[in-house]
């Protein structure tokens, strides 16, 4: 029992490094460590149900209505954003806040795009003005 409790204290990155080294030096040892990691639940991805592709969007992440799979998250894929807390007032507040933040992010990105376009246009206009001034008057055609 004490050995199992001591094994539970070892962090996952150490286990993964140990498993890789086990496969490199003696493959049955690496296979044994992998079996332990899966059996003990240290590979947390195996404990969670994967989201399902239904009706053109990924269900199970709170991203309904979007056709692309959300990005971000960790080893197990994207983190769930739509998990209910059990308090409907809080869930409504959170949903409204997230909608507001997404709208603000969209507006800010739009502002940055307009700012980039204006800066690019100013730089291009400056380039054209410098080019016109540097070349002097256009040459007169020879007759």
Image (cartoon, rainbow, N blue to C red):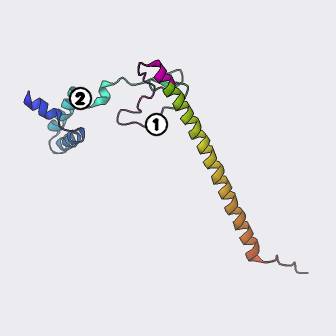
Res. 11 image quadrant: top left
Q: Main secondary structure of the magenta part?
A: loop
Q: Label 1, on which residue? A: 71
Answer whether labels 2 and 1 touch (C-beta < 8 Å).
no
Residue 4 left/right relative to 52 = left
Residue 125 visible in the displayed image: yes
Q: Quadrant of the C terminus?
A: bottom right
Q: Quadrant of the N terminus?
A: top left
Q: Earlier in the sequence, mark 2 or mark 1?
A: 2
The part of the chain drawn in magenta is 70-92
The residue closer to the viewer here, 124 or 104, is 104
Rendering coords of residue 131 (x, y %): 72, 71
Q: Residues within 10 Å of mark 2 (few under 14, many from 20)?
A: some
Rendering coords of residue 125 (x, y %): 72, 63
At horizontal 48% and vertical 20% (from top left) the residue drawn is: 89
Q: CA distance from mark 2 to mark 1?
A: 25 Å
At horizontal 58% and vertical 38% (from top left) the residue drawn is: 104
Residue 53 visible in the displayed image: no
Q: Residues within 10 Å of mark 1 (few under 14, many from 20)?
A: few
């Amino acid at each position: 029992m004490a050995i199992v409790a001591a094994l539970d204290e070892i962090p996952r990155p150490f286990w993964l490094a140990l498993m890789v080294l086990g496969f490199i030096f003696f493959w049955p040892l690496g296979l044994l460590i992998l079996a332990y990691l899966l059996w003990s639940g240290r590979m947390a991805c195996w404990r969670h149900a994967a989201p399902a592709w239904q009706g053109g969007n990924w269900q199970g992440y709170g991203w309904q209505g979007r056709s692309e799979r959300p990005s971000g998250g960790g080893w197990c894929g994207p983190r769930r954003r739509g998990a209910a807390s059990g308090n409907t007032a809080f869930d409504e507040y959170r949903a409204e806040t997230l909608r507001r933040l997404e709208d603000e992010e969209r507006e800010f990105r739009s502002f940055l795009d307009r700012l980039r376009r204006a800066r690019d246009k100013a730089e291009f206009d400056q380039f054209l003005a410098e080019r016109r001034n540097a070349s002097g008057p256009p040459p007169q055609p020879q007759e």
